[in-house]
């Protein structure tokens, strides 16, 4: 099946099923949770799932496991291992000293089989957002230079609203990187009334910016009693010019509980304006933003909504591609660690 063509011409997603994972899952004493990035290794059948635990509950890590699903539903997730992330000096990350990474995305390099992962940075300890290479053993294998505009500066990235999403181009020559929310220079974050402007960037394998586009986020999806936000939580390439973009809105009620509202869009970059040379998206002429088409509003899909932060292509079912999403439960007893599987038709 030419699944890329199917997505572009007449995409239909059929819900295969959902599964809420048990709250007591762990590997070698490391609790499972906080899944913010996933990828599927078609060669081995393994799922790699990175946690955004800043080494508070266990060492910063990614999990390895097998996800069991078929056309009738999602059966279970069996964890087979966990791999601590390592610094350039080969030490593991620590909550006590040095950088406390906030891992938000993980991808398998289609060329080498190595991994690339993104951290939103640690502004309190002086570490900018970063995209890094590592081996399957968690060993550091270099860093992709962070574009200067995305560092923590008075006009740059906002803490905890930075590198949230990664996806390789189909040929592995490029890497797409999405900011969760606008740079300070690009105007305000999303509000109830209006969505903010963020950036989606294509990098080459050395980290050079080859193209960059303005993306209009949705407004916050409900009125919060306390805090509320909306931003990109993941992206996934369809072909050379199309991306799936997952937006997630978190809304806090008066008791401190969050409700999440997620939407999945198909985005075509071919009609977008390259804004790589613009220091600000709000100074000067308004940029031509990327067009987006709504595919799934999870509020209208009972049992599938959650804090969806991770997304990857899965194994085929009867010759059809599958799309798999994971929810970050924030290690919270009342938030589901949910898996959602679609069949692409």
Image: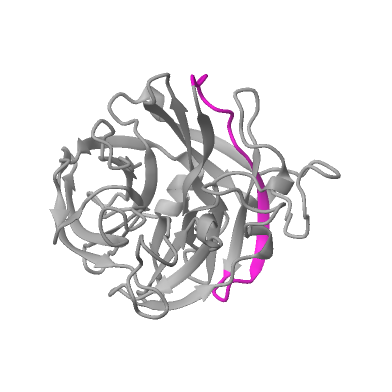
Is 137 on the left or on the right of 210, as rendered?
Answer: left
Magenta stretch: includes residue 220: yes
Is 238 on the left or on the right of 318, as rendered?
Answer: right
Question: Who is closer to the viewer here, 145 or 292?
Answer: 145
Residue at (27%, 64%) from the top-left corner?
A: 42
Looking at the image, can residue 174 be seen? yes
Magenta stretch: includes residue 81: no
Residue at (14%, 44%) from the top-left corner?
A: 24
| Residue 68 to residue 85: above or below | above
Q: Give the range drawn in magenta.
A: 204-225
Residue at (28%, 75%) from the top-left corner?
A: 137
On the image, the x and y values in percent for residue 54 come to: 36, 56
Is 152 on the left or on the right of 344, as rendered?
Answer: right
Residue at (64%, 23%) from the top-left corner?
A: 193
Question: Who is closer to the viewer here, 322 or 127?
Answer: 127
Looking at the image, can residue 78 be seen? no
The N terminus lies in which quarter of the figure? bottom left
On the image, the x and y values in percent for residue 30 come to: 19, 57
Outermost right residue: 284
On the image, the x and y values in percent for residue 275 come to: 74, 54
| Residue 240 to residue 296: above or below | below
> What is the image's colouring?
one colour
């Amino acid at each position: 099946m030419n699944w890329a063509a199917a997505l572009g011409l007449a995409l239909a997603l059929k819900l295969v099923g959902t599964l809420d994972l048990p709250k007591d899952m762990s590997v070698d004493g490391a609790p499972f949770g906080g899944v913010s990035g996933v990828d599927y290794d078609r060669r081995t059948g393994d799922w790699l799932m990175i946690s955004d635990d800043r080494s508070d509950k266990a060492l910063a890590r990614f999990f390895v496991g097998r996800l069991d699903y078929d056309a009738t539903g999602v059966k279970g997730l069996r964890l087979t291992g966990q791999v601590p992330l390592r610094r350039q000096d080969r030490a593991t990350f620590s909550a006590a000293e040095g950088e406390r990474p906030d891992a938000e995305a993980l991808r398998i390099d289609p060329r080498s089989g190595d991994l690339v992962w993104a951290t939103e940075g640690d502004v309190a300890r002086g570490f900018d957002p970063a995209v890094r290479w590592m081996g399957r053993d968690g060993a550091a294998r270099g860093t992709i230079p962070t574009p200067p505009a995305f560092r923590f500066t008075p006009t740059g990235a906002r803490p905890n609203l930075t590198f949230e999403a990664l996806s390789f181009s189909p040929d592995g020559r490029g890497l797409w990187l999405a900011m969760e929310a606008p740079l300070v220079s690009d105007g305000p974050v999303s509000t109830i009334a209006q969505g903010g402007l963020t950036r989606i960037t294509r990098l080459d394998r050395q980290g050079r910016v080859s193209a960059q586009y303005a993306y209009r986020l949705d407004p916050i999806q409900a009125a919060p009693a306390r805090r509320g936000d909306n931003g990109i939580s993941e992206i996934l390439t369809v072909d050379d010019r199309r991306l799936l973009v997952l937006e997630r809105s978190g809304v806090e009620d008066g008791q401190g509980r969050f409700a999440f509202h997620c939407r999945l869009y198909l985005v075509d970059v071919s009609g977008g304006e390259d804004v790589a040379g613009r220091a600000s998206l709000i100074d000067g002429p308004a940029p031509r933003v990327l067009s987006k088409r709504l595919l799934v509003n999870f509020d209208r899909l009972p049992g599938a909504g959650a804090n969806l932060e991770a997304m990857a292509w899965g194994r085929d079912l009867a010759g059809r591609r599958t799309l798999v999403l994971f929810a970050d439960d924030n290690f919270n007893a009342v938030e589901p660690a949910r898996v959602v599987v679609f069949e692409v038709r």
